[in-house]
Amino acid sequence: MSPPGLTQLQVGVAYARARRRRFADRAALQAWQDARLRRVLATAPRRYPYYRGLAPTRLTDLPVIDKATVVERFADLNEHGLTLDACLAAARTAERERDFTASLGGVSIGLSSGTSGRQSVFLTTPRERARWAGEVLAKALPDGLVTGTRVALVLRAGGPLYESVGTRRVSFRFVDLALPVEAQLTALEDFRPTVLAAPPSILRLVAQAKVQGRSTISPGRVLSVAEVLDPHDEREIEAGLGCRVDQIYQATEGFLGISCRLGALHLNEDLVKVERIPLDRTGRRFTPVITDLVRTSQAVLRLRLDDVLLAADDACGCGSPTLVVDEVAGRADDVLWLASAERPGTRGPLFADFVRGAVLGAPGVRDFRVVQTGAATVTVAVTPPAAHDGAASALRATVRRAGLVEPAVERADFTPLGPTEKLRRVRRDPSVPGGPAVGLTDAR
Ligand SMILES: [Zn+2]
């Protein structure tokens, strides 16, 4: 841990740099990326044993890796030589005690939430975390550090870093997501945030509390973090809190995107190089392959994420040339893969947004979960339960329209989410294989 004064200084420097950074056009952004990429490629073989023996000059000289590789080759993909088992043990102890300060040899260890597969960890040095905080602040507070700004962060972990960088003008309050919801609401009520960052499931509860007169907070900026923001939730939150919901797109692998002042979600291509694996004919829908241009504790070089993004057609009016995504449509395993009716023997995807549109469009459905449990089986849980049959037939009709074979739809009980669980309304069981990925193109 760095002394608080040093941390504050480092955050301040990163903040100032991030605010000054502007790109006239795509070519200027590309030049910025290329300069950093050259350094990343030149140092990778000596930093990380995984790349030893290679002499990459272009990004495509490196293999695309996925999260399974990160888990299997963990010690070879970090520059501190730490093993996954040692890191997991330290992180789990800290998580259990909720003291959020697990570290080994001066490197902080965070537990990744691991929505599927084996759990992993992310490593950061104090300097990397300070820089990260500065970058987030610069992008999250477009008007600067205005006196009286009170930022509330409802998160699983990591909040104390921000509390340590509070100044006279800006204060931070970390609200632990593991607390009972009522305690979270009380903490927010006491703090009266002007900026509220929380997972959409919590924002929704705050909006409901406000509508019911149990909460009086009125933040001027609301940021959805950690979970996919469903358009259905977005409308409910905006109506309840009376302000636009912006998004921070962040994964274990880094700070990947944030909404601009016009509300468009931009990828942080100044920090991360993004290649695309196209998922449809137009390539608008894609899975990102990311290369971190600044962080070195862990190699994030051509790492394929599980997300499905929908690229916007047009450049944003805010002037930033970074790629705008219309939607983070969900994790790749939030796609149902069903037999194709048109091409027997093959399978086709039904994306989460279509599933959601179908089920929420059925009369009376307030909330739902859809899980693909087998190659041709799907369970549907809705609340209230009386709306089940309508939801099931709406889902079947959507499946048919997508040119797919109707699965058997089984009824399941709707169970509300535990406080630290991630909300995923549409899920494919890890035992059910996903679809093929084809080709790989640059972000634009
Ligand atoms: Zn914009």
Image (cartoon, helix red, strand yellow):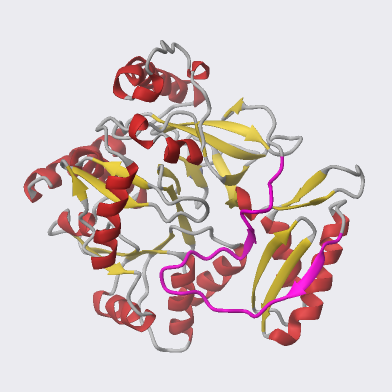
Instruction: Quadrant for residue 257, please give it.
Output: top left
Q: In this view, does 215 lie above or below 135?
A: below
The residue lying at 60 percent from left, 45 percent from top is 309
Q: In this view, does 224 lie above or below 323?
A: below
Q: In this view, does 298 lie above or below 191?
A: above
Does residue 224 appear to the left or right of 441 in the view shown? left
Observer-nearest residue: 269 or 139? 269
The residue lying at 17 percent from left, 53 percent from top is 165
Q: Position of residue 238 (x, y in %)?
A: 51, 69
Observer-nearest residue: 177 or 13? 177
The residue lying at 61 percent from left, 48 percent from top is 332
Count of residue discs: 0
- What main secondary structure does the magenta stretch of the protein show? loop
Observer-nearest residue: 75 or 212? 75
Q: Position of residue 30 (x, y in %)?
A: 46, 22
Is 343 contained in the magenta span? no
Does residue 86 appear to the left or right of 353 in the view shown? left
The residue lying at 62 percent from left, 79 percent from top is 414
Does residue 215 appear to the left or right of 276 in the view shown? left
Observer-nearest residue: 338 or 254? 338
Instruction: Quadrant for residue 232, please give it.
Output: bottom right
Instruction: Quadrant for residue 173, please give it.
Output: bottom left
Q: Can residue 252 be seen in this view?
A: yes
Q: Position of residue 4 (x, y in %)?
A: 9, 50
The quarter of the image holding the C terminus is top right
Image: magenta residue range: 406-435
Q: Can residue 135 be seen in this view?
A: no
Q: Position of residue 328 (x, y in %)?
A: 57, 50
Is 413 contained in the magenta span? yes
